[in-house]
Amino acid sequence: MVVNVESLNRTVDEVIIWSFLGVSIIADKFMASIEVITSKTRKIKYTDPNDKNVSHYIEVPVWNDTVANLTLMALGSSAPEILLSCIEIIFNNFEAGKLGPGTIVGSASFNLLVITAVCVVSIPNSESRSIKEFNVFAITAFSSVFAYIWLLIILIGISPDHVDLWEAIVTFCFFPVLVVACYIVDKGCFGVFKRKQDNDQEATLGISTEDEKYRKDLMQYIKHLKMDENYQDLTEKELESLARAELQKIKPPQKRTRAYWVREGMRVLTRRQSLTLSPKLIQKSGELRLSDVPRKYAVIEFEASSSVVRENQGYATVFVQRRGNIEIPAVCKVHTTDGTAKVSENDYQPLNKIVLFKANETRKPVLIKIIDDNEFEENEVFFVQVNSLDCSSIIDCLKDDEADTTDIRKYFDELGMFNIKDDEFEIRLSNVFDFGLMKIGLNKIHEVIIEDNDQPGTLEFKHNCMLIKEHCGHARIPVTRLDGCDGDIQIRWYTKDGKSKLNRDYLGKEGYLKFCNGQRQRNIEIEILKDALLEEDTGGFEVFLDPDDASLGVKVGKIDRVAISILPDEEFRGVLSRIVNNANQDLWHIELHKTTWKEQFKNAFSVIEGDIDKACAIDYILHFLSFFWKVLFACVPPPGIMGGWLSFIFSLSLIGLLTAIVGDLAAIAGCLSGLDDSVTAITLVALGTSLPDLFASKQAASKESTADNSIGNITGSNSVNVFLGLGLPWVIASIYHTTKNKTFKVEAGTLGFSVLVYSVFASICVASLFMRRKLKAFGGELGGSTKLKWLTAICLILMWFVYIVLSALQTYKKLNVQLV
């Protein structure tokens, strides 16, 4: 049987690339679990700096950012390299291989040289980025060079070509030493690089007065929406979404973790939905922008809540008013309902009418015929109601001859609200208009009283005291007209402060209340200011009717004043607090904690996780190629279960399994192509495991204001790769060989030369970053002028190519440099 080696080699290479696609997808799950774990918070109690008797509770992170970056975050981004090194030793009878160590060194060189170069040029022209936590970066930068120099010391100097148990233990122990050292520098313990803080208590607790300010601003914003009649129908979920959108405007962008950017990079690489606030993610999370909500409703209601008409007057005139958005046409339905006055007893003629408001019309009269008779009757009442309009309402009105078909057809055709087809037997309507810009107000029922009286009447308040809740926005105070309703009259009203103060807690010092002929009850409206809603105590004020400033003949009744008490609404306060707290949470964290198995499988079967509108040909191709991996890894428990630890364990196990397969495939590919394992490790495998980090750092560099998450974590990851990725398997192998009275051999030849070349270039790279930070011509570690940033990037990439070429030449003994 003849085997085509070239074809087989190509197939193996394709399978390796396909496997790296799977590694990227499961690594996304792994980083999501790490993000959930490290985002855990705890509540602590602190004393208000302005009032020592007041205490507050605040949630602070359990994990220190620096510790999280050097432990779980570094493990997440370097898991394939670390696991490959461990698996190779364990399945190689605890003997050192070339693939694991070579991948770690090759990945380190790619990370430091190539990724840094990409980040430098990713910054827009004339902009720059600097590392904020420079003290921590200085420690990790030194460690990233020292770690590889340490390898040279033990492989060439102390114990050539083998590793003793104590050397392996020391190598591994450098990992916790690095974490503790960075933590000390970060916290400024023992006076080491102590950071300047204006308030030590705030520094300790992580409390920011700015956060409190944003919280108060957000509280005011929500209260303003609740008071605004345009937004009173919004649900709590919609208010929360609006609050989150507002928070994004007033608050600086939230600091992202390294795990976030690694996930973002992996999603860019595999053409999946971005974790940033894309419109699809906004819609999925109930996110709603204020522009999505109508700015102004047309509010339609009766002008007065009650009126009186004499039986011999012939018609009762009821006024329907429109306020709010009067720039658009509006329609409503007005109809009558029996009270003690009945249609069946010929007291009045029923009405079922469409009221049409043209643009800028605010007031429309409605006439109701009153039937006069010769019998003596007590005062009787019936009711008029205003409702929103629908197709059935129009049909009823047309059938009752209350609206002319021709006029309505012309009117609605002009508005584009209805298409009306009218023939001899049939009326058909199809609604093509959105009534979202119109709503019915509170005065939607009007009482009509039929009586015999010719007096202007007596005015008094309907109640002598009223309780209103703090979030109502307006106090609507009813004034009743008794003993006659003839003529147009008015009366002056004024307010007097109580606990609530004018212009601070409410608006409306005085005004005139007007009654048209026949109107029996109208309301005084006083606006409650949103600033008053922050008060904890009950507020209040009084409203008076002025008998000395009223129309001729008008009297003031016994109830000439009303006491208004503003009560705190604890339920409303609870809703506000919940909305603000939820809005303050990062949407990214909300999505992580709320993800379910159902959503995972749904996303796995969908192109770009359901955002098909943005899909292109390459998205469908990658969906087809990654479909198996996406469905397989959808079985991993969601990160919201058990605080992320269950997903962490499953993901890490699957990464280990997949890494073992990739290692074997890489070895097979090397054999088929004639490449040595060392060359395969520093090229194909290192490149495949580092591509997600490349995209992650590029995204962080272009979208964040600092360089911490783009290059600040590279040095830490490179250090952890040696201390954990080589230290741990070396400890395991050294213990095994010690129990067998054998020596754990690690040949320094190719590995030592590769480490040496990398150490030289790493020192140059770190020095160049320090230089870029200090020299004003560069502006910072990243970015700067076009010429300078491209010069830096080209130099770094050339060093990486030189590293690859020199390592390959040494492997094939073209250089044959003897280090021992």
Image (spheres, rainbow, N blue to C red):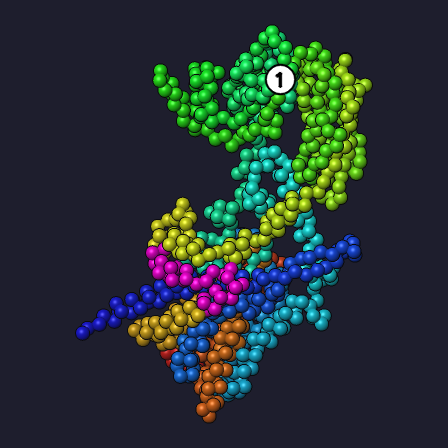
Above or below: residue 2 compared with residue 285: below
The residue at the point 53 percent across, 21 percent down is: 335
**Boundaries of the magenta span:** 623-652
Total labels drawn: 1
Identify which residue, 603 or 319, lies in the foreground: 319
Q: Is residue 546 left or right of residue 682?
A: right
Residue 403 lies, in percent from the top left, at 47, 16
Residue at the extreme left of the image, as rendered: 1
400 within the magenta span: no
Q: Callout 1: 10 Å neighbours few (<14), some, many (20+)?
A: some
Give the residue number, with chain letter if any, for mark 1: 380
When the figure is inspected, residue 92 is found, relative to residue 108, above or below; the finding is below
Q: Is residue 528 left or right of residue 607?
A: right
Front in this rendered view, residue 244 or 511:
511
Q: Secondary structure at mark 1?
A: strand
- Give the amino acid at mark 1: Glu
- 773 up-or-down from 297: above or below: below
| Residue furthest to the front | 376
User: Which part of the image, by quadrant, shows the N terminus?
Assistant: bottom left
Is 20 placed left or right of 138 in the picture? left
Q: Main secondary structure of the magenta part?
A: helix
